[in-house]
Image: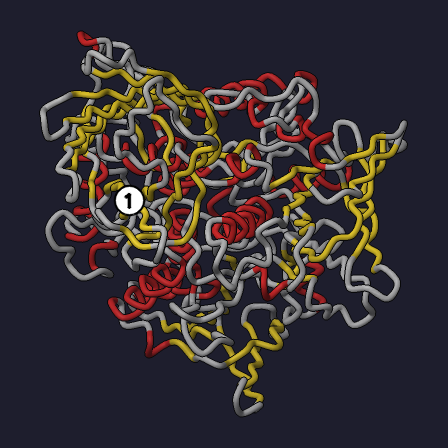
Amino acid sequence: MNICIVGAGPAGLVAAKTFLQYPGISVTVFEAADRVGGMWRGRQGETGDKCDPEMRTNLSRFTVAFSDLDWHSVFSAPSGHERIPMFPKAHEVGKYLDMYSDKFKLDSVIQLNTKVVKATRSDDSRSWKITTEGIITGRLCRTDFDYLVIASGFFDKRGRSFDPSPSKILPNVQHSSRFRRLHSLTDNAGKIVVIGGGISGSEAAATAAFQISDASTRPDSASTVHTNSKIYHVVNRPFYLLPRYIPTPRDISKPQDSETAPKFLPLDLVLYNLSRRGNGEISAATTTVPPEKARKGHEYMRSLLGSDQSDLGFPELVYKETQMQYPAYTGISDTYAEFVRSGIIIPVQGWVEAVKQRQGETAFDVSLKQYDPWHHVQASESTGSSTISNVVGIIEATGYKVDLDYLDADTKEDLDYDPSCPRIPFHFTQASTMGLPTLAAVGFYEGPFWGVMEMQARCIAERWARGETLLENLEDSSGPDPFRGDETRVMREALKDKRSLQVPQFWMSDYVGLVEQLARAVGISRDDYGLGHQRGPIFPARYRRDWADLEGNAVAREVYALSRDDEDGKRFIAPAVFRGLQGVWNFTRKIQSRITSSSGSSHSGTAHFSLRASNRPEIHNEYLYTEDGEPESENGLSFGETRNYICRYNHSADSISRGFLVESDDNLDYSHLPWTFRAPDHNNGERGWIANYAFRNRETGVEIFVSLEFRFRGANIDTFRIIHRIMGQNRENHTHETWYERPKSEKVSRRASVGVVTKTRATMYDTMA
């Protein structure tokens, strides 16, 4: 039996490895690029293809992995207390896939720089004629195969472009897959519009906003063109902004567990948890979401975030009561929400109708229409219109389209090809395809999980190795069945014909159900060691075929240790706190002194934790802390404490540190003042996570002892306190106690603050904010 696999990304590699485990099967993988990895193949320092090689994954390394390769094998052994990244960068994922290919000796079956240009069935429809073209040589070659696996990825061609030029190559209009730096988009400061409210849209908006934030902290730098630029993010509906670390469910049996001092885990270890599915058999819920279930989803999202996002000041990000009957959409970003609160990102509700280039200029006017609840066929007319004028650059997060042009017309017809339904253009099943038993697809759906890809490959390999066709196993099945493709037809009907608003953000989003159902189909038992039966998070290593596999076993034990909370809940507090500090805060400071001549003083103002890039390689990002206004005391006392400093998070050391900014050269004087975290002492009135550090002024000899308390509401810091205890050379003691809280959101729409002129049925975004 010889099998053709198209694509050497994650799906193609895991399919090849799985097939090669069966005797008598030969595999050939065709890959058009010059290396394996698919969208992850870009190396550090390169531009990348569909994503920036420096982009971090949205899910942890436990989920972005296969069952039999531990991420610790990819990185050299860390020294001391260093840890490998919990959310790897894209180029590190590419390195993982390189090692996966090496471990299972896949190089010998992969033909790089070779593109499949045609795939047709033989006369008896039992085999395939595959025509390939050498990317370098241009040579055409035809080979016969018994089976064909499509693993070339669901997202291939870029989606719709609003570029108004005939050539569609204007430099200041870029697809989100190409966008890297604002200065490569446009040299002009002004309004940057991001079109598209999905995962990629929120990511592109946050990336651009970060570059603006970074430029604003470096007034003397050459790269400050966009210091005053704004990001206008066009979204058709609200969405919840989930950070990468979210609170775990509170254990009410433990009095020490506090809502204001929650424990954190990577979001996938919380969201994809078997404990949320009850004790019965778990199957995939690939269907529309009924209103009562949709409402529960909104309530759960709000419980994780601690709010409905109205505190950010933009109603465009808040689901109305009448909209909570529809499924909640999400974006994953650690920074987007606070860029909104700070005014760098301005959400705009609507659908882009047209983009027009201004006469004799490079700028654009972007016309929008609004619908209620959002764009829908049942809406007979729009509820309003608006224009974002004088736009200097556009980032199109309009997604991708499927590209299976190499399939012949008869095969497309048998797959019920429908280009008018881009979300489900073909009818594939979880195993070999109905009516086409020698054709299958791996990872060919929106937002595929690596664990699902691996399970799909196992299911297909098991059936083909036994020589079974799909119908032989399913003659007695009834109801919707993922192996028959019933759920695909149901969801396509909901999308295309009924235009149902009950379709979820990703129509095959039930990761837990898919993995459980496919595992049963191929007879793989779940590893419940330490986590308990049907408890704890799911991840590929928990469904490894060989339980003696050392790497898979190590991953399972690591997740068990994290879930067991070996470090008193402190393991992910540092990144959760660091993320939560971003942005603008109101503060109130009280200064007390034991000097008899001083009665102390108080001071209120606004503080900013401005996010920027670090000049140190081990630091991903850092904050520049600044305050508006100067503290005053009744007798003019000065305690030598600067109010500008740097706050950094070191990923490898998993620690936050504080340093002083030397204004002359933008470097740190005290470059390493690490924070030590501990749980709150409720007996002493502490309600939030506590951090401590201390330092001594080298010139004055003054010693300063710092204690911080962070009180959370959901995943976000609600309020925090910093106490500085200052001991002078004569042992005089001064105390600065500062409380921080977020500014209250305005009672009216923030549109007034971004230059919006509202009309009866039209809004003009015509003033530079």
The reply to whether residue 428 is visible in this rendering is yes
Give the vertical position of 583 relative to 165 (above or below): above
Q: Quarter-wise, where is residue 642 in the image?
A: top left
Of residue 570 and residue 702, the one placed in the foreground of this image is 702
Q: Position of residue 313 (x, y in %)?
A: 61, 26
Q: Position of residue 599 (x, y in %)?
A: 29, 11
Residue at screen point 23% across, 9% down: 685
Circle 1 is placed at which residue position? 660
Of residue 432 and residue 723, the one placed in the foreground of this image is 723
Asked whether, in this view, residue 41 is left or right of residue 600, the answer is right
In the rendered image, the quadrant that contains the N terminus is bottom left
Residue at screen point 41% across, 70% down: 45
Give the vertical position of 174 relative to 674 (above or below): below
Neighbor class of circle 1 (other Cα within 10 Å; few <14, some 14-19, many 20+) is many
In the rendered image, the quadrant that contains the C terminus is top right
Residue at screen point 85% across, 32% down: 384
**Badge 1 amino acid:** Phe
Residue at screen point 32% across, 70% down: 24
Of residue 163 and residue 754, the one placed in the foreground of this image is 754
Q: Position of residue 294 (x, y in %)?
A: 58, 23
Q: Quarter-wise, where is residue 234 in the image?
A: top right
